Image: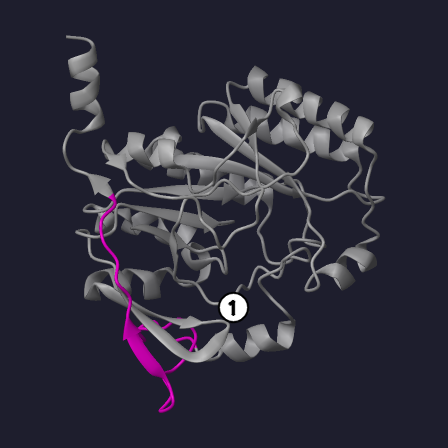
Amino acid sequence: MILSVSRRTDIPNYYSEWFFNRIKDGFVYVRNPMNVHQVSKIDITPEVVDCIVFWTKNPEPMLERLDELALYNYYFQFTLTGYGMDIECNVPHKKEKIIPIFQKLSEKIGRQKVIWRYDPIIFTKKYTPEYHLEAFEQIAIALKGYTEKCVISFVGIYTKNKRNMKLMGAYEVDEKELLEFAKKMARTAKKNEMIIGSCAESIDLEQCGIEHNCCVDKKLIENIIDYRLKVNKDKNQRDECGCMESVEIGTYNTCKNYCKYCYANYNEESVIKNCNKYNPESPILCGVLDKDDKITERKVKSLKEHQLSIKDIEGILHA
């Protein structure tokens, strides 16, 4: 099983104590967002978790506790953009705070395991293509040697963020300008020794030197864990998304970053209400179990193919 922690909220930043408690207990409860009384009990012991994918804008609360994950394999999807607090409202200053945190995490766990995400890219009067290119270059220079890969995406307009996009004055550029913009980003990434990939983009950016990326990445995970995986594409994601199947343990409407482009927070009132329920000892994130809840144990298992490891196969091929 690949564990997603989490597309729905920033667990490393705001709920790491809860997560480490769940690791100690070996299970977690997750409420179905489409059926509130349907709760899954999920085994998250090392025997079934092949890899954990962390998604965050600030993993600082986890840095001194990573030894508690010694029995697990994992990597971080670390979002670091050029936006100010007008868009990423609760994210600390990038140059003074977040870039040093990125560097420290990379030094602890290795640059292969820290993926830099410069996404989503939004164009406004303030955040023009020129602004993004300058910000991207400055961050890329600072992260040279601290990551092997950068992922970009262009903002998607959803029902849940449409109003905020309009308030920001977000606009689209034509395809020719977008491709030229992407080529410049690719050149900057290459100059700073990074592969660059796109996240769930319908437009073909390979001609710009940007590969189609998988955030829950089978190849990367196999390299990290040194085993082949028997895993399928995640059917719950968009068609353009190349991610593998994973088990999500986050909760919507709990992210206190309050990013204006977010699709996982419906409104601030819901976030405040849910965050008030946070109990790091609870088996469920930002919630309590109700008498009407139906708890079902979700069947999960390791996806490893145990016949031969990758190193074994390479040894045979080069013998």
Residue at 71% x, 29% y: name it.
133
Seen in the picture, residue 318 relative to 82 is either above or below; the reply is above
The foreground one among 299 and 187 is 299
The foreground one among 247 and 112 is 247
| Count of numbered circles on the image | 1
Seen in the picture, residue 96 relative to 15 is either above or below; the reply is above
Toward the top, the furthest residue is 319
Seen in the picture, residue 99 relative to 52 is either above or below; the reply is above
What's the magenta bit mostly, secondary-structure-wise?
A: loop
- Could you say which quadrant of the image residue 164 lies in? bottom right
Residue at 69% x, 46% y: name it.
155
Residue at 37% x, 60% y: name it.
16
Residue at 41% x, 73% y: name it.
31
Q: Amino acid at mark 1?
A: Thr
Which residue position is annotated with label 1?
Answer: 254
Q: Quadrant of the C terminus?
A: top left
Residues rendered magenta in the picture: 278-303
Membership of 63 in magenta stretch = no
What is the crowding at mark 1: few (fewer than 14 residues within 10 Å), some, or many (at least 20)? many
Left or right: 9 as drawn, with respect to 17: right
Q: Position of residue 198 (x, y in %)?
A: 58, 34
